[in-house]
Image (tube, grey):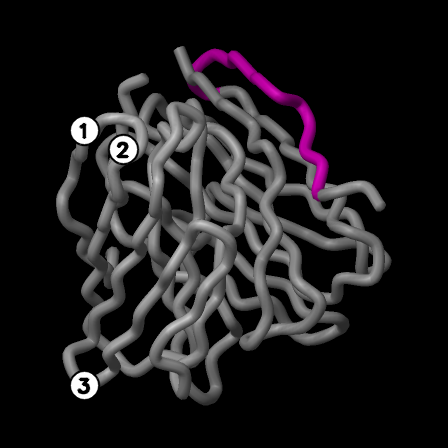
Amino acid sequence: SQQGEEDPQALSIQEGENATMNCSYKTSINNLQWYRQNSGRGLVHLILIRSNEREKHSGRLRVTLDTSKKSSSLLITASRAADTASYFCATSRGSGNTGKLIFGQGTTLQVKP
Amino acid sequence: GAGVSQSPSNKVTEKGKDVELRCDPISGHTALYWYRQSLGQGLEFLIYFQGNSAPDKSGLPSDRFSAERTGGSVSTLTIQRTQQEDSAVYLCASSFQRGQETQYFGPGTRLLVL
């Protein structure tokens, strides 16, 4: 079963605008990761945020984590047409875990040129 | 270095046949994971290998599914007596060590069971 829920399920914006995607989860975690997927194939790792971190940046990406609310957000600034893809959050759970990832349902982002 | 590779890229098979899917993890990565992505179920964990430890098979959907990892490197996922509901993209990932590290995914094998 999926732990994460993401919203929105689909997002359509104009190039240059910012895109925000949210992810909620249910159990304690070690870390939370965001992945991008193009055309239903391989997942590309974007960013990992650990449970003791609150915010992390990587280029045009900004991720926040609120463990009290069990939620995370991914912000893509100054979006480009090439950012069109599906975005998934994935959590890795606490102690004793194998590190397997539990994925959200994903947000489909369309960036119009 | 090379990323995670999987073969075949696509596989079409008839219901009832057995299939084998292969994963070559990134060299030096000790942890290897199999996931399945299907329309109705999203991305699901199947099985995990870490070094010489017993694998975590908790995600395998039925006893028709099995996997092995030989020599701590290459892994094979086998589906026996395939069913139409097995149609999905099967993704393999590896990481340097379990639990704390980024998982790097292969391009996946798209399986279609007719």
Q: Is residue A17 magenta?
A: no
Residue contact at pointers 1 and 2, CB within 8 angstroms = yes
Locate residue B52, reporting x and y percent: 76, 73
Tag nearer the camera, 1 or 3: 1
| Magenta range | B4-16
From what the image shows, is residue A93 above or below residue B49?
A: below
**Label of residue A109 in the image:** 2
Q: Closer to the camera, B34 or B65?
A: B34
Q: Is residue B11 magenta?
A: yes
Say what amino acid the circle numbered 2 marks: Leu
Image point (47%, 41%), residue name: B64
Where's residue B104, x and y in %?
61, 51
Q: CA distance from mark 1 to mark 2?
A: 6 Å
Q: Residues within 10 Å of mark 2 (few under 14, many from 20)?
A: many
- Badge 3 marks a residue whose secondary structure is loop
Same-chain check, marks 1 and 2: yes
Query: Which amino acid does the dot numbered 3 rest on?
Result: Ser
Q: What residue sits right under mark 1 in the picture?
A: A12
Amino acid carrying label 1: it is Ser
Q: Earlier in the sequence, mark 2 or mark 3?
A: 3
Residue ID at (56%, 48%): B66
* Front one among A10 and B14: A10
Residue B97 placed where, x, y %?
Answer: 67, 72
In this rendering, the count of numbered labels is 3
Left or right: where B14 falls relative to A105 = right
Q: Earlier in the sequence, mark 1 or mark 2?
A: 1
Residue at 30% x, 27% y: name it: A15
Disc 1/disc 3 C-alpha distance (Å): 29 Å
Secondary structure under the numbered disc 1 in the rendered image: strand
**Residue at label 3?**
A68
